[in-house]
Amino acid sequence: MNSNILRQVLRFIFVVLLQVLIFKQLSLAIGGNHYMSVIIYPLFILFLPHKISHSLLVLIGFLLGMTIDLFYDSPGVHASATVFMAFLRPVALKAFEPRGGYKTNELPTRHEMGINNFIFYTATLLLGHLIFYFVIEAFSLVYFIESLSRTIVSFIPSLVFIIIYQYIFNPKD
């Protein structure tokens, strides 16, 4: 098996375990509803190589979301949000592409993109994922304000943990 594929499989397992065993427990409940959730599993989609095919990216997003759905007892909610994010990823990569373009088979890290572009790329896709996730979870636009507030409250800690993950597991400074 190719070492890059093995590395991605191990990262998939590690991210799912982190989300399910640690970050699932870090939710804030108000009135019996989970108001704030720390969601870091989208980082797997964020850190896939630039040149991955779009259909494979969406399929991986679906598999990742369904795996998380199995542990969260939320049939299809995480999967749909992750597929949405995987669908938008090529657009975000194009928007934040550096002047010289991307190197083949490189990962979108802070070293390749620059810290500012990396944070904007991560924040844009994570925000899209969270908005889609919370709106689909409510399944009604009647609760749009509540979904938007849950998105904002969940966005900040999720982004912080994803950036910390980037510094811990891709240290090149």
Image: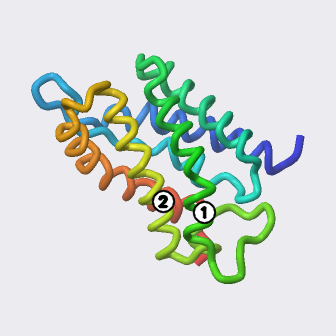
Q: Which residue type does callout 1 highlight?
A: Leu
- Between residue 125 and residue 141, name the one nearer to us: 141
Q: Residue at x 52, y 34 (%)?
A: 17
Callout 1 environment at 10 Å: few (<14), some (14 to 19), or many (20+)?
Answer: many
- Between residue 103 and residue 167, name the one nearer to us: 103
Q: Position of residue 152 (x, y in %)?
A: 25, 50
Outermost front residue: 141
Q: Which residue type does callout 2 highlight?
A: Thr
Dividing the picture into quarters, in which one does residue 72 lie? top left
Q: Which residue is mark 2?
A: 122
Q: Are the residues tagged 2 and 1 within 8 Å (C-beta)?
A: no
Q: Which mark is residue 93?
A: 1
Query: Height in image: 14 above or below 3?
Result: above
Quadrant (top left, top right, bottom left, bottom right) of the N terminus:
top right
Query: Height in image: 85 above or below 93?
Result: above
Residue at disc 1, secondary structure: helix
Q: Is residue 143 left or right of residue 45?
A: left
